[in-house]
Amino acid sequence: DIQEQGQCPDGLMVTVEGEVFTEELEKVEEVEVNLSNIGMMNMTEGDGHYEFANMPLGGSYEVVPEKDKDYLNGVSTLDIIHIQRHIIGYKKFESGYKTLAGDVNNNQEVTAVDMIELRKLILGIYDELPDNTSWRFVDEAHTFIDVENPWLSAIPESYVINNLSDNMEIDFIGVKVGDVNGSVVANATNKSIDTRSQRWDLEFVIEEDEVKAGEIYKAQVRSGSYENVSGFQGTLEFDAEKIEVLKIEGKALNLTSEHYNKQSQKEGWITLSYHESKARTLDSDEVIYEIVYRAKEDMNTRSLFEMTSKVTPQEAYRGYNDVVNIRMSYGKAQNVSIVNVSPNPWTE
């Protein structure tokens, strides 16, 4: 938003300033605002404000805000759920900023590829997005012609001053790429508020087994609280000296290799991110998914697996907005599930 601030006192030097804030009016800190053609930069603080004082009249400048860090800030599997629901028409994005945030791979459309790219970020396969920055910034004065296709007209991600003649205020809307539900923590004073229901955790129950070294087993995961669940994510931790995880197989769920990352299983953790476009309820006797592993020693499997936030934060989603905790518990096995494999070692 550009407003004339009155004549400068000496008629020679003026100020170019503004604020950077999100669509929800949260001020964005640590944004580098550059006057790109003269090499000047000012960093926003918690108030989202930037300022270039004592600017000479008559100059031409381009104001360019940039922030390319903290890719996972505000990003979770819940965003993938919202992106898919937008794509298939269950609930379309209601603003051009949300559509821009959903364009994860920066190709000017929101498709299933954006979901795949975002999941790789959540699972820790990516440290950053290969084709996009962490934040995008739009001139606050810009109006989207079509919120579902904000690229119909050029999106002004900088502001050009052709002939500086007065004090200027130029504001920008910050868009956190991947965050389509507005959960980003934009500044240090705006701490994330944990609204999780502590009494309605999603509990995964694994049967407790006695296993033998060298054999391959399936740890079957059930739940008595899989009610109205649209997805979940987390880090599955285990003792890599005791077992080798071979794969995770969906049973009641369509969970496949794209939903987990076992590149670091030798370090004792695997990340998971699973979602569905419609929330589901499963009976307590249904096997949700199975963890296929080879035992390296004879042992009892109680507490063998734990769901944590070591890499991918643990959380589940009831409906399409409520976030709840995940916990794992163990029960006595009805019968031990041994997988007979020939030849050995394990192959698909």
Image (spheres, rainbow, N blue to C red):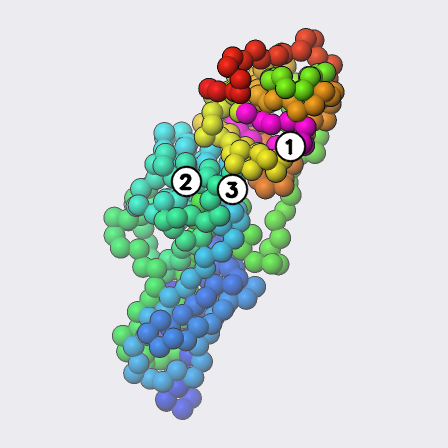
Name the residue: 42% across, 48% down: 129
Which of 119 and 93 lies nearest the eye of the viewer? Answer: 119
What x and y, as percent, mark residue 266?
59, 35
Ranked by sequence position, the earlier of labels 2 and 3 is 2
Residue found 36% across the figure and 30% down from its top: 89
What secondary structure prevails in the magenta region? strand
Residue under numbered circle 3: 124
Q: Which three-letter amino acid code belongs to the residue tagged 3?
A: Gly
Which secondary structure lies at badge 2? Answer: helix
Q: Residue at x 29, y 83 (%)?
A: 58
Q: Quadrant of residue 33?
A: bottom left
Q: Nearer the viewer, mark 2 or mark 1?
A: 1
Q: Residue 205 in the image: x percent, y percent?
A: 67, 21
Instruction: For mark 3, give the secondary structure.
Output: loop
Q: Residue at x 53, y 55 (%)?
A: 186
Q: Which residue, given by chain and number where applicable, does mark 1 sit on?
A: 240
In the image, residue 281 sits, relative to residue 173, either above or below, namely above
Asked if the residues shown at circle 2 and circle 3 are in contact, with their CB atoms under 8 angstroms apart, the answer is no
Q: CA distance from mark 1 to mark 3?
A: 19 Å
- Look at the image and tell me whether residue 225 can be seen: no
Q: Position of residue 235 (x, y in %)?
A: 60, 35
Between circles 2 and 3, the one closer to the viewer is 3
Q: CA distance from mark 2 to mark 1?
A: 28 Å
Region of the chain picked out in magenta, as a range: 229-246
Amino acid type of the residue tagged 2 in the rendering: Glu
Q: Position of residue 272 (x, y in %)?
A: 54, 32
Q: 249 and 36: which one is in front?
A: 249
Mark 2 vs mark 3, CA separation in Å:
11 Å
The residue that disc 2 covers is 117
